[in-house]
Image (spheres, helix red, strand yellow):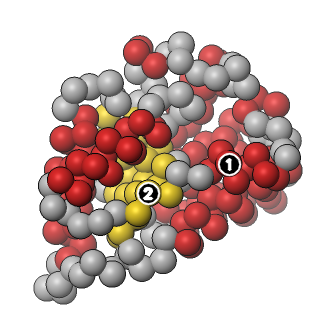
Amino acid sequence: MKRMTENDRFIVAITGAQGVGKSTFCAKLLTALDTAGLGSFRLIDDLRNRLELTGVPFGSGSTPETIHAVWVVHLERQVVSGNERTLLDRCVVDALAYTRVLAVSSDLEQRLFEQIGRLALSRLNLIIHLRLSDFFADKGKPHETPQHRHLVAKEIALILDGWHGAVLTLDADNPSAVERAVAAVRAALISDAR
């Protein structure tokens, strides 16, 4: 059994449709992980800011350039996690879901993104999926229509159904959601240490 050290790479990724409480949940989870004594996790939550710097349109009005920028930023964020414990606010699952739903990529690009997605997913230790619950159904931002958000939420669920790694699906508004996430991180850390 290998011993887990503070410097080992361990990535917990949070995914879900726009407006399901990912950023708020990540902030709460980061504090809870520290309180639970599970080590220091680095929160990477700069996706939106980095994408805004590219000048591409967002949401329902995305273009092929948007998809390319989203993939580059997602992959850069995952690489930047290096050899430390990381909490990713949004991940390649989101990129793949948006790529599929928007359908603005060529067939060759779509195949490339699918393969890149599989490779990037294999580097994640745990994915926490926040569902588009009734509580968040009308909490989206104007750049995404409700129909678009529901299609993305459905696609995220399909991607995760086909993935063989550790996934925990929660409603962010559930009072026990953070506690359940901490337990899942603890279990994944123990499993990874074996």
* Residue 162 in view (yes/no): no
Q: Closer to the N terminus: mark 2 or mark 1?
A: 2
Residue 83 in percent (x, y) is at 42, 79
Left or right relative to 58: residue 178? left
Which residue lies at the image location 76% right of the left edge and 46% below the top edge? 52
Q: Residue at x 59, y 21 (%)?
A: 140
For label 2, the SS is strand
Q: Residue furthest bottom?
A: 2
Tag 1, which secondary structure? helix
Q: Which label is found at residue 49? A: 1
Where does residue 84 sit, x and y in percent of width and height?
A: 39, 74
Q: Position of residue 59 (x, y in %)?
A: 73, 33
- The quarter of the rendered structure image containing the N terminus is bottom left
The amino acid type found where label 1 is placed reads: Asn
Q: Nearer the viewer, residue 143 or 161?
A: 143
Q: Residues within 10 Å of mark 2 (few under 14, many from 20)?
A: some
Up-down: is 34 above or below 85? above
Residue identified by numbered label 2: 43
Type of amino acid under label 2: Leu
